[in-house]
Image (spheres, rainbow, N blue to C red):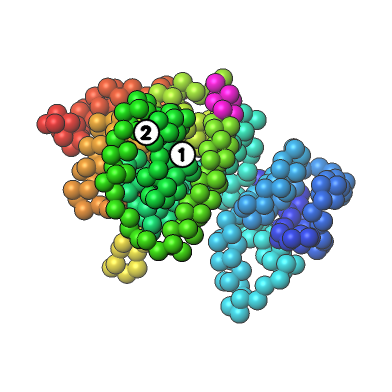
């Protein structure tokens, strides 16, 4: 890359330390405020100082506000660094571990100048891809919160009213939440009439609510309280209702995100490609599409995204010893996307299930087997993305037969 100046930025809460070095080696330390006005004025002043050529701005990953501000400038090449890489570089030069903002900015600048040809310049995706990615990431954050509250609800009910979890089959059941919101204790549930139970279950969308209400009424009559301690029952029942009050609005907000994603996904150029995948569905198909983006030049080989996503294992060797283990550093959401899609494909794709079973039989743990399956899926996804062709299960199985794959033999024997 031909550049005229390189800027290392160490992010701070109120101000950001910067080290600017020209191509000729002249250096200048500066401070940058965090307001939009100060950021744009700063980059314009840099352009006045270096009117021709590319200005490289290096900063640690995750500082998206600065990246969003600078992405509009065509003369800026943004290089986000893995924080582990910058930390390792600093520790290699400072065994004491001493650190301050100004010197860290200088080290970031040094690191990028020395490795500028090896580092990937960040390029913004198109608007639709960025929108779906951000919506999907934020949706996942809300889902994680809902999952945490749901697990807490299950743990709370097990301490004073465990039968209700058995009656409705799942801690995630909206019927369970509707029931506990109205009758949070077994004692109160005994006073519920069959008509009241039917109305409550019907309000939560239960099919054949009257039949289900009759069954629940019989189970209530036969139930025995886990504890009669009033302190436990009153406090835990309050906690259960409080958790439900937090879960319900999360459901509503997640539904809004689903609607927003579906609206943008409806006319996405690669929709047909990723909708064809077994088990992808309305949630995973958009996530897989934005994992690759629309820029077909971003990746030249499937191995690049296998490594970047953390799905590919790492092999280490020291002397005669050699061992392989999972990667420890990767973009979490991207890693989750491939891992979760591989798991979702199991009930929908026979060869995927056969491959998973084979890995388990060879001694792999569940998540290890899923990562191995995701590794294989990425090769398929990469080819689909490059060629623009949807997935055809029969075509892939036929390719396995042509290669005399053991997976094809397992499928034939099934």
**Residue 275, relative to residue 321: is it above or below?**
above
Residue 107's disc is none
User: Where does the magenta region start and end?
Assistant: 259-266
Residue 194's disc is 2
Q: Which residue is outermost to the bottom?
A: 96
Per the image, label 2 sits on a secondary structure element best described as helix
Q: How would you rate the neighbour count of disc 1 (Cα within 10 Å): few for under 14, some for 14-19, many for 20 or more?
A: many
Residue positioned 61% across, 76% down in the render: 97
**Residue 400, relative to residue 149: is it above or below?**
above
Coordinates of residue 262 in the picture (x, y in percent):
54, 26
For this rendering, which residue is in front, 341 or 162? 162
**Residue 309, relative to residue 92: is it above or below?**
above
| Residue 238 left/right relative to 302 | right
Residue 410 found in image quarter: top left
Residue 87 found in image quarter: bottom right
- The residue to which callout 1 is attached is 178
Magenta span has 316?
no
Coordinates of residue 185 in the picture (x, y in percent):
42, 50
Residue positioned 57% across, 56% down in the render: 82
| Residue 217 left/right relative to 177 | left
């Amino acid at each position: 890359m031909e550049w005229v100046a390189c800027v290392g930025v160490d992010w701070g809460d109120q101000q950001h330390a910067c080290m600017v070095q020209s191509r000729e080696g002249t250096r200048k330390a500066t401070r940058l405020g965090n307001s939009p006005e100060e950021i744009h004025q700063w980059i314009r002043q840099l352009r006045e100082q270096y009117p021709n050529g590319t200005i490289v701005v290096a900063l640690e990953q995750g500082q998206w506000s600065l990246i969003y501000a600078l992405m509009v400038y065509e003369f800026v090449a943004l290089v986000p660094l893995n924080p582990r890489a910058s930390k390792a570089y600093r520790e290699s030069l400072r065994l004491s571990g001493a650190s301050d903002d100004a010197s860290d900015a200088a080290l970031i600048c040094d690191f990028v100048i020395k490795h500028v040809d090896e580092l990937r310049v960040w390029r913004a995706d198109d608007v639709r891809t960025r929108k779906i990615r951000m919506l999907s990431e934020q949706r996942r954050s809300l889902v994680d919160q809902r999952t945490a509250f749901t697990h807490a609800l299950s743990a709370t009910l097990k301490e004073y009213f465990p039968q209700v979890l058995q009656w409705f089959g799942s801690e995630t059941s909206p019927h369970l939440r509707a029931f506990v919101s109205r009758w949070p204790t077994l004692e109160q549930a005994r006073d519920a009439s069959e008509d009241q139970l039917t109305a409550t279950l019907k309000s939560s969308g239960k099919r054949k609510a009257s039949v289900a209400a009759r069954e629940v009424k019989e189970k209530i009559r036969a139930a025995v309280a886990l504890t009669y301690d009033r302190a436990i029952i009153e406090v835990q029942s309050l906690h259960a209702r409080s958790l439900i009050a937090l879960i319900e609005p999360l459901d509503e907000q997640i539904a809004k995100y689903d609607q927003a994603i579906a609206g943008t996904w409806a006319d996405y150029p690669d929709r047909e490609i990723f909708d064809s995948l077994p088990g992808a569905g309305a949630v995973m198909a958009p996530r897989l599409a934005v994992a690759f983006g629309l820029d077909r030049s971003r990746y030249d080989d499937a191995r690049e995204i296998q490594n970047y996503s953390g799905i590919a294992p790492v092999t280490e060797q020291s002397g005669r010893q050699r061992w392989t283990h999972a990667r420890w550093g990767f973009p979490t959401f991207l890693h989750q996307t491939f891992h979760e899609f591989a798991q979702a494909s199991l009930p929908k794709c026979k060869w995927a299930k056969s491959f998973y079973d084979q890995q388990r039989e060879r001694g792999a743990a569940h998540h290890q087997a899923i990562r191995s399956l995701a590794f294989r899926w990425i090769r398929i996804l990469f080819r689909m993305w490059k060629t623009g062709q949807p997935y055809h299960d029969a075509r892939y199985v036929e390719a396995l037969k042509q290669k005399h794959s053991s997976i094809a033999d397992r499928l034939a024997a099934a």
